[in-house]
Image (cartoon, rainbow, N blue to C red):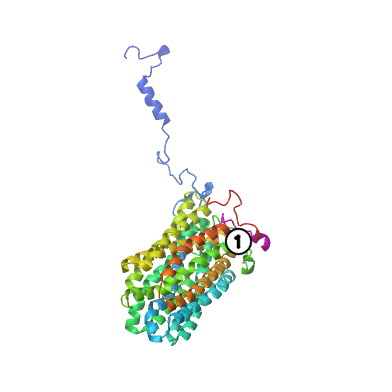
Amino acid sequence: MRRGARGRGGVPRVGRRQLRHRSRTRRRRRLPGERGELVTALPVRPLDPAGTVAAPGARLGAIGRVGNVRWTICGLLFAASTINYIDRQVLGILAPDLQRLIGWNELQYGYIVSAFQAAYAIGFMFAGRLMDRLGTRRGYAIAVGLWSFAAMSAGLATSALTFAVARFALGLGESGNFPAAIKTTAEWFPKRERAFATGIFNSGTNIGAVIAPLTVPWIALTLGWRWAFVLTGAIGFIWVAVWLKTYAPAARHPKLSERERQHILSDREPPESPVTWRPLFGYRQTWAVMVGKFMTDPIWWFYLFWLPKFLHDNYGLTLATVGLPLVTIYVLSDVGSIFGGWLSSRLITSGWSVNAARKTAMLTCALLVTPIALVSRARSLREAVALIGLAAAAHQGWSANMFTLASDMFPRGAIGSVVGIAGMSGAIGGMLIATAIGLLLQLTGSYFSVFLMAASSYLFALLFIHLLAPALAQADLAKPVAAGFNRPAGPPEGGGHFQ
C-alpha cells in the first residue's frame, strides 16, 4: 500500500475527491419507485376545485380532468339561443319583399316590430318568475315550445294586423330564453366561468342570425315565404325533446362526476328562496341592470329588424343578394360575444376585481361601437358592412357582460326575476325606438340620426351603471326595500372607482 494511505490507528485515509463524491451521493434524494416498490400516489397535495390545498384523501380524485358535462349544458343553451334568433330574424330578412306583397308602409312595419317588443316586455316579467318557480328544465321547455308554435303561425298571416298578432305571440315565448339561460349558467358554473359561458351561449344568437340569411332566402325563393316561417319554427320542438331527455340539475345529474360537481359548487352561495320582482325595484343594482338594457337593447333590435331594409334601400340588395353582407356582420358579432365574455373572465383570473373586470370590458365594447356614427356616410357596401359588423360585435361583447351583472349582484333565487326585469326594460326601450324609427323613416327616409344614437348609447349606459352600482356590490335582500334603495349600491370599501 502506498505510503501515507493509512492514518493514525491504521484507519484508511479518504481522499478529498472520494469525500466530495460520497457527499454528493448521500445528498441525492431517492425517488419513489427507485428500488422497485409499488407507488400508489405521488406524495403531493393537490389543489381542490376551489384553489385550496386538498385533504390527503382527495389526492387520487384530484388527478385528472374536472369534466365537461357543464359545457354540454352550455351547448344546449347555445342551441336554444341559435333557434331563438333564427325565428326572430325571419321577418327582418323577408321585410322588403313582404312590404311589397302585403302592402304595409314604414310606420305599419314599426308597429309590427313594436308588437313583438311589447309582448317581449310583458313576457320577460313572467318568464323570470316562471324559471324561478318551475325550474329551468320545465320552464325552458315551455318557453321554447310556445315560441316555436308562434313562429310557425306567422306563415298563416295575410295582413299587417295578423303579422302583428303572430309576432306578439312570438315575443311572449322568446322572452323566456335569456332568463332561463342565465339561471342555468348560475346553476352550472362557478362565478369565475360564468361570463365566458354566457359569451358562448349568447354567441348562439349570432349563429342564428348567420344561419337565417343563408337559409331563409333559399326557402322563400324555392318553396315560398310562408314555408320559411313554418320550417324554421319547427326546429324548436326538436330542441325541446333533447332538452327534456338531457337536462337535470347539477346536484343530481347522473353523468356529473364528483370532481366536476365540487368545481361547480366551489363558490356557490347558500340556497335562496325565489324572490318576487316587486321588492327588487327597491335596489339600485336592479336599476343599474335595467338602465343598461333599456339604453342598449334597442340598438340590437334595430340591427335585427332594419338592417336588411337599410341594405336594400341604400345599396339595392335583394332577397337573393342580402345574405353575404348579413352573414359577415353576424359572424363578426359572434366573435365579439365570445371576446367580451372572455375578456372579463380573463381579467378576473388575472387578479382583477369583478367590478373592474366587468366595467373595463364594457368600456372597451362601448368605445368600439362609436364608429358606426359614420355608416350613413359610407362610400361603399364593404365599408358599411365593416362599420356595422364592428358595432354588432361590440354590442354582443357588451351584452355578455351585461347579462352577467345580474348573477354578480344578486343571489341565485333572484337572478331569474332580475334578468326578467332587465329584459322587460330593454324590450320597452326597443318598442319605443321601433315606433320612433318607423315614424322617422316614414317622414325623412334617412338613417343618419338612428346610427348617431347607436354610437353614443353604450357610453351613457355605462356611466349610469357606474353611478347606480359603483362597486357592483351584492344586493342585501334581507334589508328593507327602502333601505336598500336609499343606500348606495356600493362600494362597501375603497370608494367608487373601478377596483
Residue 37: percent from left, percent from top: 42, 42
Q: Is residue 79 left or right of residue 473?
A: left
Instruction: Name the residue at 51% across, 63% down.
Output: 403
Mark 1: secondary structure: helix
Residue 176: percent from left, percent from top: 52, 72
Q: Quadrant of residue 380?
A: bottom left
Q: Quadrant of residue 316?
A: bottom left
Instruction: Name the residue at 67% across, 63% down.
Output: 481
Q: Is residue 66 visible?
A: no
What residue type is disc 1 on?
Arg
Q: Main secondary structure of the magenta part?
A: loop
**Chain part drawn in magenta:** 468-485
Q: Is residue 266 left or right of residue 221?
A: right
Q: Is residue 444 left or right of residue 484?
A: left
Q: Residue furthest bottom?
A: 158
In magenta stretch: residue 479: yes
Name the residue tied to disc 1. 284
Q: Is residue 359 above or below residue 94?
A: above
